[in-house]
Amino acid sequence: MKKFVAEESFWQLFPHAAIGVLAVQGLSARPDEARAAQIKAFLEQANTQAKRHLTSETISENAVVAVWRQAYQKFPTKKGARCSVEALLKRVLHDNPVGSIAPTVDITNAISLKYALPIGAENLDAIAGNLRLGIVKGGEDFLPIGSEKPEPPLPGELAYYDDAGIVCRCWNWRDGQRTAVQDDTDSEFIAMECVDPARLDELAAAVEELAGLLGSLLNAKVLQKQIVTAQNREALLES
């Protein structure tokens, strides 16, 4: 059965990290008007809630961002690569709220903003074999979203990858086209990452809330829900 594996090379860098994993199915259905309004309102509220995480006008000085800046110094990265949640919080900091994109994206962005935790989603059906998180050799196949030319990872870079190549570069920085979520994507792998041991309870709460919202607002079926840690390094992605 298809599974997600956080490899030893990852835990050597981040022994106290945790990754909330969701595998969900049935996301291609569109919400009715009432649920669409609920999703819109939830995203708007999350933009406001995110402000509690921003105590400094300098984005890198906020604790929820600083911990990721430090994490990204532990492995080679492309210049300018940042944790995905930083871009969302930067918009809030600059009074440019994160707007609506698509129902699934809006819900995940809202949870990411509310808890200031990065969330990534991939087309589960497009993943070849097992999905892994670990240090890569460099040069593996990777065509990023929005680009027409390959941008392979650096030697020693931390990335999500499968049997066909890189899925997301620089841990949670940039997704590839091959496994990108589209409007008609029905099944998704969703990862929510935490590198601050003091926030593990918040991670668990965020995973629970995200799973509940995807079910109640999009009628999604949760195939798997798990917190991956150094003591429990794998998660099945099928029911």
Image: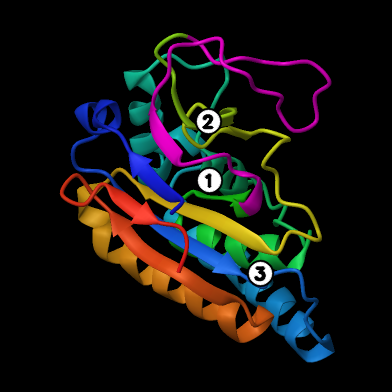
Find disc 3 in the rendering and name its residue: 43
Query: What amino acid is found at the position of numbered circle 3 in the picture?
Result: Leu
Find disc 1 in the rendering and name its residue: 85
Query: What amino acid is found at the position of numbered circle 1 in the picture?
Result: Val
User: Considering only order in the chain, which callout, 2 or 1, is on the residue closer to the N terminus?
Assistant: 1
Q: Secondary structure at mark 1?
A: helix
Task: Give the magenta-colored segment's residue range.
Answer: 125-154
Q: Is residue 229 left or right of residue 43?
A: left
Q: Is residue 52 visible?
A: no
Q: Quadrant of residue 68?
A: top left
Query: Are there few (<14), some (14-19), or many (20+) residues within 10 Å of tag 1?
Result: many
Q: Secondary structure at mark 2?
A: loop
Find disc 2 in the rendering and name its residue: 163
Labels 3 & 1 near each other (Cβ < 8 A): no
What residue is at 46 percent from the left and 32 percent from the top? 171
User: Considering only order in the chain, which callout, 2 or 3, is on the residue closer to the N terminus?
Assistant: 3
Q: Nearer the viewer, residue 167 or 130?
A: 130
**Location of residue 105 in the rendering, given as x and y in whole percent from the top left corner:** 68, 60
Q: Nearer the viewer, residue 130 or 140?
A: 130
Quadrant holding the N terminus: bottom left
**Distance in Å between CA atoms under marks 3 and 1:** 15 Å
What residue is at 31 percent from the left and 59 percent from the top? 227
Q: Secondary structure at mark 3?
A: helix
Farthest residue in the left direction? 231
Query: Are there few (<14), some (14-19), or many (20+) residues within 10 Å of tag 3?
Result: many
Quadrant holding the C terminus: bottom left
Q: Is residue 127 left or right of residue 97?
A: left
